[in-house]
């Protein structure tokens, strides 16, 4: 099972900083960030970590838009079989629905959701 954490916060840089702090020099980590950066990108400083793979997806409610973007991106990340997965969300408005989505097949058998991080 891949440990997966949802990360919310007021700005992209705060979400990235929270993820960077949680990484603690870990390796083999996948990060999906919703939305564009706001000029400060704390994860850029950690690109030296082995196995760190960061991808950005366009902003938009991941549970209301049919999950297509999230499914495609998530499936690509999970093929790598990372030890950890962080998903930075631009809004916590539908956090429960996103957790529900991740707790359904096929993701329920692949992911172990950990407590959310609020930045």
Image (cartoon, grey):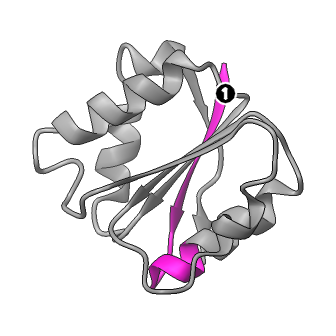
**Position of residue 46 measured from the top left corner of the image (x, y, whole percent):** 76, 61
**Position of residue 17 measured from the top left corner of the image (x, y, whole percent):** 67, 75
The quadrant of the rendering that contains the C terminus is bottom right
Is residue 2 within the magenta segment? yes
Counting other residues with Cα less than 10 Å from the Cα at mark 1, is it few (<14), some (14-19), or many (20 or more)? many
Q: State the residue position of label 1.
A: 82
Nearer to me, 86 or 58: 58
Q: Residue at x 11, y 39 (%)?
A: 66
Q: Is residue 29 left or right of residue 93?
A: right
Depicted 27 relative to depicted 46: above or below? above
Dividing the picture into quarters, in which one does residue 10 lie?
A: bottom left
Depicted 17 relative to depicted 27: above or below? below
The quadrant of the rendering that contains the N terminus is top right
**Position of residue 100 measured from the top left corner of the image (x, y, whole percent):** 35, 37
**Position of residue 41 measured from the top left corner of the image (x, y, whole percent):** 58, 76
Depicted 61 relative to depicted 68: above or below? below
Q: Is residue 39 left or right of residue 65?
A: right
């Amino acid at each position: 099972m891949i440990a997966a954490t949802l990360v919310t916060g007021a700005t992209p840089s705060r979400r990235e900083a929270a993820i960077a702090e949680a990484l603690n020099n870990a390796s083999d980590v996948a990060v999906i960030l919703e939305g564009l950066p706001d000029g400060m990108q704390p994860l850029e400083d950690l690109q030296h970590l082995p196995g760190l793979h960061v991808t950005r997806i366009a902003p938009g409610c991941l549970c209301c838009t049919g999950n297509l973007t999230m499914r495609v991106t998530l499936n690509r990340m999970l093929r790598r079989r990372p030890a950890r997965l962080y998903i930075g969300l631009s809004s916590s408005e539908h956090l429960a629905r996103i957790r529900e989505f991740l707790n359904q097949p096929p993701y329920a058998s692949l992911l172990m959701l950990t407590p959310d991080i609020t930045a």
